[in-house]
Amino acid sequence: MWPFLHAAPDFLSKCDCCGQGCGEVKCPYCIDGIDFDSYVQKKSFCLEKNGFVFSLKRDHDYYFQAQQKLHTTGRDYLNFV
């Protein structure tokens, strides 16, 4: 649909209640031995924590990558793993 954007998701998914989705997998080797609660304090980390929920920071490159994948695939949601 938009091949010049190079936004291929790592996997496709489907849920009866949420519809069709896609996913992105990242392997943060730099957090080895550190828990997410401690690592989320780092400015460069891609996630933020609100209560018990982790979400992508809206000013991080991964957020824009996720939005591009949703747009190019036409999927309803993206799982960030």
Image (cartoon, rainbow, N blue to C red):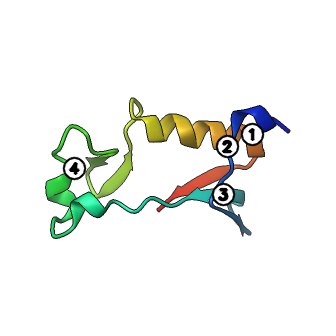
The residue beneath circle 4 is 40
**In the image, is 37 to the left or to the right of 79?**
left
Front residue of 51/79: it is 79
The residue beneath circle 1 is 72
Along the polypeptide, which appears first: circle 2 or circle 3?
2
Q: CA distance from mark 2 to mark 1?
A: 7 Å
The residue beneath circle 2 is 7
Q: CA distance from mark 1 to mark 4?
A: 29 Å
Q: Residues within 10 Å of mark 3 (few under 14, many from 20)?
A: many
Rendered location of residue 16, percent (x, y): 74, 69
**Secondary structure beneath disc 4?**
loop
Rendered location of residue 43, percent (x, y): 20, 37
Position of 80 relative to 6 (above/below): below
**Secondary structure beneath disc 2?**
loop
Q: Residue at x 39, y 48 (%)?
A: 55
Report the mark closest to the observer, 2 or 3.
Answer: 2
Q: Are marks 2 and 1 in contact (CB under 8 Å)?
A: yes
Along the polypeptide, which appears first: circle 1 or circle 4?
4
Q: Residue at x 66, y 57 (%)?
A: 22
Q: Residue at x 34, y 55 (%)?
A: 53
